[in-house]
């Protein structure tokens, strides 16, 4: 009998789950090399198949992963488009999956269980907007860019009280940006619109073409096409009885900082302009420096940064000089192929770069020179850049902007200390900080914009 019990115990030990078994289902979070926070959510489908979604707030990335492996003592997955993978084992003592993230090189990544609520980034300014009573009306609206046969959708906020009110159109930066300016989990245009409308200024913000509820195709649009959409937004404001047609302005951020003065230069009826992190130099020069600054912030060695700077300078200058997209793509292809041949680029990277850069939007951005347009702006204009902006660095952009606006006595050009490209209070200004910072728009910047507009329109 004793022998039978011993044998039965051995059988049970072999068939039971390991002592360190853990159910992977749920949400897990950790940091790659203790610096880049990631969240992974594991789910099991009805047919028993495992799947997972990975998010990296600092890189504005949310994506399904492939080749998911889940066992009681180990997990793993791949992200083929980034040539990355993760493999980990369960550590009962640490109550964590301890493993390695591999993407060219390896780095530790340990995942601990979290909750849906805890994994959400904190956005106190946006939470406050939702919690406190509004002092303005907010209306869903639509307007048309007849020339492009596109219908655009947005939100129109109007202060309570006796109008008509001064008003602004908010023009987005580059990328697939909606009416709230949603990026890295932040909604800076929502925060800006709320602040202005509480200060007695009506605001129209809208989904960029091809985004949200707006029609059209963003991929086919250039900056000048997007400027035509902003002009349609101005026409909408001028049609509204709540708005004082003589006190309508444009606020543009980043790429929108190119659009806003462009509109003012050809429409004297625009009352004022606000440029937020708008470029002051040509796109080709700006992007060379932008790439270098962002690489340095990521810790890339100086020798590699300088090598990339030489390549990017040749690539962007060549593309900007060509009169057509076909010619620009052909010249860029030759430069990238030569870089691969010399070992300056990994094999296959040139084709990926050509797909990324070889568009009408990018070619026109490279060739666009802001100074000639700024020299023709006669309206009051407020130009703001953050001291820690690495995408449109103040030290590069503000001096030529000051020079271009020297003949405009109503121009104000300021560098705001401690702020990044999104006008958040930042430590370094790197893109990796954007999603980690809780602040969506620095209050000092909000007050500067609203105060200047109120003084200007009065």
Image (cartoon, rainbow, N blue to C red):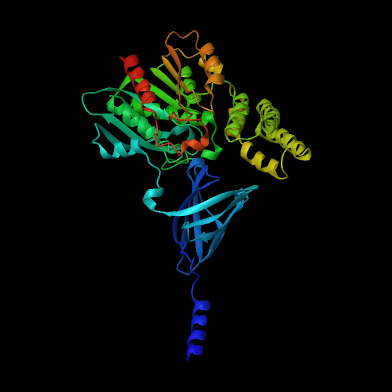
Give the percent coordinates (x, y) of residue 292: 62, 30
- Quadrant of image for the C terminus: top left
Residue at image point 55% right, 16% down: 371
* Residue depicted at 58% across the width and 53% down the height: 100
Residue sitting nearer the eye, 423 or 75:
75
Q: Residue furthest front?
A: 2
Q: How many marks?
A: 0
In the image as oriented, which residue stretches furthest toward the right? 341
Q: Measured from the top left, where is residue 113 in percent x and y?
A: 43, 55
The residue positioned farthest toward the bottom in the image shown: 1
Residue 267 appears in view = no
Horizontal and vertical percent position of residue 225: 51, 31
- Asked whether residue 271 appears in the rendered view, the answer is yes
406 to the left or right of 291: left
Residue 58 percent location from the top left of the image: 49, 41
- Write down the quadrant of residue 303 in the picture: top right
Q: Left or right? Give the position of 444 relative to 315.
A: left
Q: Nearer the viewer, residue 434 or 20?
A: 20
């Amino acid at each position: 009998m004793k022998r039978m019990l011993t044998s039965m115990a051995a059988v049970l030990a072999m068939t039971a789950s390991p002592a360190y078994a853990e159910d992977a289902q749920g949400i897990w979070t950790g940091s790659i090399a203790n610096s880049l926070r990631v969240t992974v959510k594991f789910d099991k489908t009805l047919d028993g198949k495992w799947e997972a979604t990975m998010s990296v707030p600092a890189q504005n990335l949310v994506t399904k992963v492939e080749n998911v492996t889940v066992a009681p003592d180990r997990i793993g997955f791949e992200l083929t488009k980034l040539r990355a993978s993760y493999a980990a084992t369960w550590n009962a003592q640490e109550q964590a999956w301890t493993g390695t993230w591999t993407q060219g090189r390896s780095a530790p990544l340990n995942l601990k269980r979290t909750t849906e609520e805890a994994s959400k980034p904190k956005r106190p300014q946006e939470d406050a907007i939702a919690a406190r009573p509004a002092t303005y009306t907010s209306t869903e609206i639509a307007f048309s860019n007849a020339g492009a046969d596109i219908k655009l959708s947005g939100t129109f906020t109007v202060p309570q009280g006796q109008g008509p009110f001064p008003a602004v159109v908010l023009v987005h930066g580059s990328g697939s940006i909606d009416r709230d300016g949603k990026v890295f989990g932040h909604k800076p245009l929502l925060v800006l619109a709320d602040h202005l409308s509480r200060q007695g200024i009506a605001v129209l913000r809208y989904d960029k073409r091809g985004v949200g509820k707006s029609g059209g195709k963003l991929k086919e649009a250039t900056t000048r096409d997007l400027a035509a959409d902003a002009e349609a937004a101005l026409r909408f404001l001028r049609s509204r009885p709540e708005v004082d047609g003589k006190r309508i302005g444009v606020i543009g951020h980043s790429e929108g900082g190119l659009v806003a003065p462009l509109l003012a230069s050809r429409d004297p009826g625009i009352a004022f302009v606000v440029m937020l992190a708008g470029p002051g130099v040509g796109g080709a020069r700006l992007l060379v420096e932008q790439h270098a600054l962002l690489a340095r912030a990521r810790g890339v060695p100086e020798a590699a940064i300088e090598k990339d700077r030489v390549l990017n300078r040749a690539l962007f200058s060549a593309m900007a000089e060509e009169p057509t997209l076909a010619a620009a793509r052909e010249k860029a292809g030759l430069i990238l192929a030569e870089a691969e041949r010399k070992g300056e680029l990994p094999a296959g990277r040139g084709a990926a770069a050509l797909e990324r850069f070889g568009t009408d939007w990018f070619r026109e951005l490279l060739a666009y020179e802001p100074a000639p347009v700024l020299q023709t702006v006669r309206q009051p204009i407020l130009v703001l850049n953050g001291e820690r902006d690495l995408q449109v660095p103040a030290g590069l952009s503000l001096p030529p902007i000051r020079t271009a606006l020297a003949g405009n006595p109503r121009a104000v050009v300021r560098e705001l200390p401690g702020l990044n490209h999104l006008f958040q209070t930042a430590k370094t200004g790197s893109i990796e900080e954007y999603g980690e910072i809780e602040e969506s728009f620095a209050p000092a910047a909000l007050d500067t914009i609203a105060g200047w507009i109120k003084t200007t329109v009065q």
